[in-house]
Amino acid sequence: MKPWLSVDEQIDRLEGHGIEIEDRGRAASVLQAVGYYRLTGYLYPFRESEQQVDEEGNTQIRVLSQYRVGTTLRHAEDIIDFDRRPRMLVMDGVERIEVAVRMRVGYVLGRKSPFAYEDPACSAPTTPSPSSLTSCRR
């Protein structure tokens, strides 16, 4: 089990592994926003590595705990921003679908009555299908 570290200790740990921290305040904000383990996950491609040859002659790559010289916190921030953009586009699309479905359900139920949502005949115990809404359309 890994020990709990304060944000300042997390920054010290990052620096100890070779991450260049220009602004400790900014580093603290990033760590508080995304967390140490998520941040280091984004920095994983910047870790030092070495090749090893096992007993059978196979070459393997061993990833080390140190980061490549010149790795900065900004590298992680750029990847986090890049990763966030497609997620936000997907969430925007999901929100539009949600609003459209809610509008359609309200439109269909509202045709019968403004209080159709309270009428058990207009709801089904499972996901509604067009046929289950037939009684509400009349």
Image (cartoon, rainbow, N blue to C red):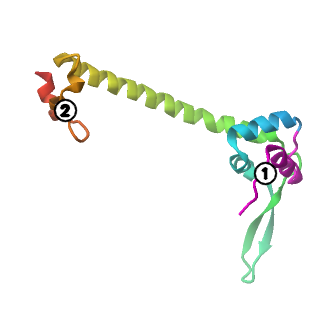
Q: Position of residue 93 (x, y in %)?
A: 46, 29
- Residue 127: % across, % down: 26, 39
What is the quadrant of residue 70 in the picture? top right
Residue under the point 87% across and 35% down: 23
| Residue drawn 89% across the image and 37% down it | 22
Give left or right: position of 91 versus 14: left
Is residue 20 found inside the magenta-colored segment of the image? yes
Callout 1: SS? loop
- Magenta region, residue range: 1-21
Image coords of residue 100 (percent x, y): 35, 24
Q: Nearer the viewer, residue 19 or 52?
A: 19
Q: Which one is closest to the eye, mark 1 or mark 2?
A: 1
Taking the spot 86% from the left edge, 37% from the top edge, the residue there is 24
Report how far apart the C-alphas of labels 1 and 2 lie in the structure.
55 Å
* Image quadrant assignment for residue 11: top right
Residue at image mark 2: 130
Q: Nearer the viewer, residue 13 or 54?
A: 13
Which quarter of the image is occupied by the N terminus? bottom right
Q: Which residue is mark 1?
A: 5
Residue 74, label in figure:
none
